[in-house]
């Protein structure tokens, strides 16, 4: 519902929608089919309308008045905020009561945390860190959720041997909400699956990012920590999620090209931030502790000298063949090989998260007990 009425709740996927256009280019009444709805944000995705057998190419920014057969006296003003072509040919209408172009930030409640996991390049172990960090935090009694935001190349479901029927692509198109696709992998670890091989989703529009940001807020009702596994590199979607989270891990390896790409991502994040940003480096695939410390010192020095930014250091992960074997078995090494050197490294990062530099423990504020009580009442 939005705008003080219930029109949006009565529309369904496949419903016919009638709207009036009065602009310098087009005038008239058109009918189209609803193919996506997000009532919390006042969004409706519709097929291109037709007139005399031809597509009506209404431009972005056009204001339309949408009527409803059940409530004809309650017409609503909408604005077209997106016009998609190709196979996903459609228009996105946004209710005029909602802000159109504001980029939504994600604000978790005080007793819950949002962590981003990002990297300057692919193949450095970003997703492996996100998964094993979630399992390590679960061992410490944190209820965790992995939000796979690596759209187009998502693989959290693959590494955990999941076969979800729905994913974030369905959320973006309005076919379902984030709670509908939430998948439990163990009592304290859940996954919001992303999608792979869907090229249009690799470049989120502002409205699509805002849609996911709003949906993500729902998760804080049920989880202590939400870990966002972002796309590698400096894509707008990845940068937006990291900046929205305000806190996260920057994953690199000791190789020179990885360090260079990590600095490039860091520079982008620092120059685009509008709020405080707390990033901590994790050096993956390390043979010796001095190798990790040397890598961290290089990046911290560059960040301090050229970006005036204090980059934190959360630790390192040993280069352990058992990590690859665990990935092949589609099982986190923290769970499958708890005594492995890499498992101990992941746990050290989790413990460092629970005891940050200021020495104050990140308490759960009784959230787990509240969730249990909600479950008893349901």
Image (tube, grey):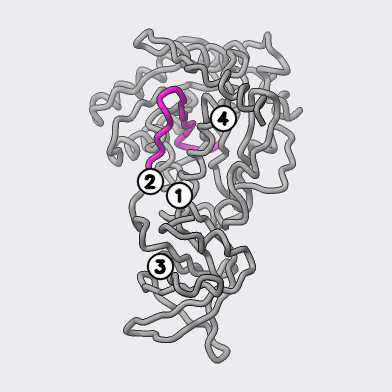
Q: Residue at x 49, y 31 (%)?
A: 117
Residue 299 appears in which quarter of the rendering?
top left
Task: Indicate the position of residue 30 as horizontal and vertical percent values.
Answer: 50, 82
Q: Which residue is mark 2?
A: 104
**How would you rate the neighbour count of disc 4 (Cα within 10 Å): few for under 14, some for 14-19, many for 20 or more?**
some
Q: Of the residues under marks 1 and 2, which one precedes in the sequence?
A: 2
Q: Magenta region: which residues?
A: 105-122
CA gap between label 2 and label 4 equals 21 Å
Q: Which residue is mark 3?
A: 78
CA gap between label 2 and label 3 equals 19 Å
Label 3 sits on a secondary structure element that is strand
Q: Which residue is mark 1?
A: 209
Task: Indicate the position of residue 48 as horizontal and vertical percent values.
Answer: 53, 75
Task: Indicate the position of residue 179 as horizontal and vertical percent values.
Answer: 61, 41
The one of 140 and 214 positioned closer to us in this rendering:
214
Q: Which mark is residue 222?
A: 4
CA gap between label 4 and label 1 equals 22 Å
> Which one is in front in this view, the residue at disc 2 or the one at disc 4?
4
CA gap between label 1 and label 2 equals 8 Å
**Residue 87 painted magenta:** no
**Residue 343 appears left or right of 97:** right
Label 1 sits on a secondary structure element that is helix
**How would you rate the neighbour count of disc 1 (Cα within 10 Å): few for under 14, some for 14-19, many for 20 or more?**
many
Q: Of the residues under marks 4 and 3, which one precedes in the sequence?
A: 3
Q: Characterize the magenta stretch by its predominant secondary structure.
A: loop
């Amino acid at each position: 519902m939005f705008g003080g009425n219930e029109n949006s709740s009565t529309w369904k996927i496949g419903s016919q929608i009638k709207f009036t256009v009065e602009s310098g280019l087009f005038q008239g009444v058109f009918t189209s089919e609803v193919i996506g709805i997000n009532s919390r944000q006042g969004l409706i995705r519709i097929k291109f309308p037709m007139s005399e057998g031809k597509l009506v190419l209404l431009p972005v920014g056009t204001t339309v008045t949408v009527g409803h057969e059940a409530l004809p006296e309650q017409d609503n003003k909408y604005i077209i905020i997106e016009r998609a072509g190709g196979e996903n040919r459609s228009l996105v209408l946004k209710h005029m009561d909602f802000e159109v172009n504001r980029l939504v930030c994600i604000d978790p409640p005080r007793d819950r945390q949002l962590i981003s996991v990002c990297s300057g390049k692919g193949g450095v172990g970003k997703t492996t860190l996100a998964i094993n960090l979630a399992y390590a935090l679960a061992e410490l009694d944190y209820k965790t959720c992995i939000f796979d935001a690596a759209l187009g190349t998502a693989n959290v479901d693959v590494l955990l041997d999941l076969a979800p029927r729905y994913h974030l692509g369905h959320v973006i198109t309005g076919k379902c909400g984030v709670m509908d696709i939430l998948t439990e992998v163990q009592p304290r670890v859940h996954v919001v699956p992303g999608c792979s091989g869907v090229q249009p989703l690799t470049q989120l529009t502002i409205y699509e990012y805002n849609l996911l940001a709003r949906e993500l807020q729902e998760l804080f009702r049920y989880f202590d920590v939400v870990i966002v596994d972002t796309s590698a590199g400096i894509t707008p979607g990845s940068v937006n999620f990291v900046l929205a989270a305000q806190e996260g891990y920057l994953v690199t390896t000791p190789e020179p090209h990885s360090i260079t790409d990590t600095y490039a991502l860091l520079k982008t994040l620092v120059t685009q931030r509008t709020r405080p940003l707390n990033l901590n480096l994790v050096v993956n695939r390390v043979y010796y502790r001095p190798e990790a410390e040397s890598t961290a010192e290089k990046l911290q020095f560059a960040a301090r000298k050229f970006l005036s930014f204090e980059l934190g250091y959360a630790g390192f992960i040993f280069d352990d063949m058992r990590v690859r074997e665990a990935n092949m078995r589609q099982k986190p090494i923290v769970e499958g090989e708890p005594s492995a050197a890499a498992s101990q490294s992941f746990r050290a990062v989790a413990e460092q998260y629970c005891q940050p530099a200021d020495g104050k423990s990140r308490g759960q504020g009784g959230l787990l007990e509240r969730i249990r009580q909600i479950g008893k009442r349901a």
